[in-house]
Amino acid sequence: MQRLAGKVAVITGGTSGLALATAHLFVAEGAYVFLTGRRQEKLDEAVRAIGHNVTGVLGDAANLADLDRLYAIVRQEKGRVDILFASAGYAEFGKLGDISEALFDTTFGLNVRGTLFTVQKALPLFAEGGSIILNGSLAASKGFAAHSVYSASKAALRSFARCWLVDLKDRHIRVNILSPGVIDTPGLDLVAGLEAKTHLAKLIPRGELGRPEEVATIALFLASSDSSFVNGGEIFADGGMGQI
């Protein structure tokens, strides 16, 4: 039996990596997915790759007008949201002393402000008993050089989840965080070369980076009724890297 049969899901920043893998899996499990991305070419590629039960919506999760347009399309086509995976995020790194105003504003603008309004603007469409998944990070729980702004932006999501589940308890909407570790995605390729990726793999007990599909299965768990008693939690998909 398909675990998301008849459900309507929104996935932001979903044109590559773990979010795209999640979109593929959600559709395979019976959901209709609205997928967002900032580049039309990549968005079109993602929609073609998924093939059916998917609508691509061009937009930036940090832009409130784009979010309004996204949910207007969802309202027109499906009328509700059952699952929201607020996946869009930004990563740039700088050591204390070298942090620019632009780095801070862009990171918090998407990771914190964008996530907040992605969720808030979805609420009028949210079905009772729905599931909200926030894309966290192992970095929020560890101290890495040059990561302070990025890590802090992801740590804010942990507080969001704890408070929002109380705000939404009367509607039985669950809020959880999925926190990946080092996942072998195109996004990682932009910030880490082969030598760095080899080093990172050695920090993971199995000696290999995570795969997007491995994270997608956890998103499916949080989206489905399988996790009906999981609320306000944080699930790490880090291969044990953050636990040792």
Image (cartoon, rainbow, N blue to C red):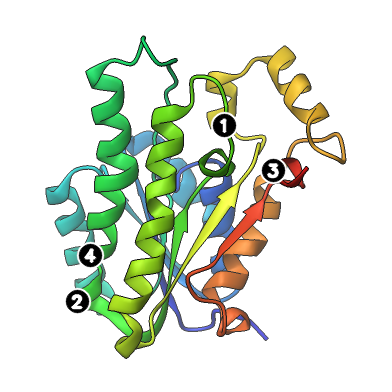
Which label was assigned to residue 242? 3
Q: Name the residue nearer the viewer: 73 or 64.
A: 64
Q: Quadrant of the N terminus?
A: bottom right
- Foreground mark, 4 or 3, reads 3
Q: Earlier in the sequence, mark 4 or mark 1?
A: 4
Reading the image, the residue beneath label 4 is: 120
From the image, state whether disc 1 or disc 3 is nearer to you.
1
Q: Marks 4 and 3, how far apart in space?
A: 30 Å
Q: Position of residue 129 (x, y in %)?
A: 41, 86
Question: Where in the figure is residue 6, as x and y percent of width and height?
Answer: 47, 83
Residue on which disc 1 sits: 143
Which label was assigned to residue 124? 2
Image quadrant containing the C terminus: top right
Q: Secondary structure at mark 4?
A: helix
User: How far across and down, in percent of the image, does residue 115 sit?
Assistant: 31, 52
Of all residues shown, which one is farthest toward the right?
Answer: 206
